[in-house]
Amino acid sequence: MSKPKILFLCTGNSARSQMAEAFLRKYADDRFEAHSAGLEPKGLNPLTVRVMGEVGIDLSGQTSKSVEVYLGKTLFQSLVTVCDDADRNCPTVWPGVSTRLHWSFQDPAAVEGTEAEKLAKFREVRDLIDQKIQSWLAEQA
């Protein structure tokens, strides 16, 4: 039997959706097939790779993908928007999706300041996404 496919969607697919995909793979790769995409892909943010590496997840091989890669080609059972912009601008009808969720996380890539301040925001968002994935998985049991 195939695993349910889940798509994490944000605007740039540079940070939040990449983190969510990685954490779902880490915690439930045997139960779900995780993917991520962006409405306007911007490339993987180097700080995303760095902070995920701090928790033992290597994203160096990941790429930023457009939602167009999946639309009409892959059937997802669940769609999770992880930013408000994606929630507002994502198609409201997605073929095959039985569950659509919105988890609002601040965009760490939008934070201005020193590298230390930027890293602190990336770590904060990473940890929030980690907690959300784990609590969502507990609800699925």
Image (cartoon, rainbow, N blue to C red):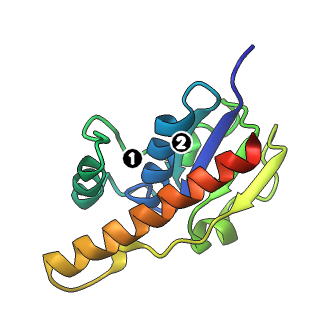
- State which tag comes first along the sequence, 2 or 1: 2
User: Quadrant location of residue 120?
Assistant: bottom left
Rate crowding at label 2 as few (under 14), some (14 to 19) or many (20 or more) other CA atoms within 10 Å: many
Q: Are marks 2 and 1 in contact (CB under 8 Å)?
A: no
Whether 136 is drawn above or below 102: the answer is above
Q: Quadrant where the N terminus lies?
A: top right
Residue name at image x 16 percent, y 77 percent: 116
Location of residue 133 in the rendering, given as x and y in whole percent from the top left corner: 57, 52
The residue furthest top is 1
The reply to whether residue 109 is visible in this rendering is no
Mark sitting on residue 24: 2
User: Quadrant location of residue 71?
Assistant: top right
Mark sitting on residue 64: 1
Q: Nearer the viewer, residue 91 or 131?
A: 131
Rate crowding at label 1 as few (under 14), some (14 to 19) or many (20 or more) other CA atoms within 10 Å: many
Location of residue 7 in the rendering, given as x and y in whole percent from the top left corner: 62, 44
Q: Quadrant where the C terminus lies?
A: top right
Kind of residue at badge 1? Ser
Is 65 on the left-hand or right-hand side of 31?
Answer: left
Is 126 on the left-hand or right-hand side of 115?
Answer: right
Using the numbered discs, state the Cα–Cα distance from disc 2 to disc 1 in whole angstroms: 17 Å
The residue furthest bottom is 113
Is 74 on the left-hand or right-hand side of 98?
Answer: left
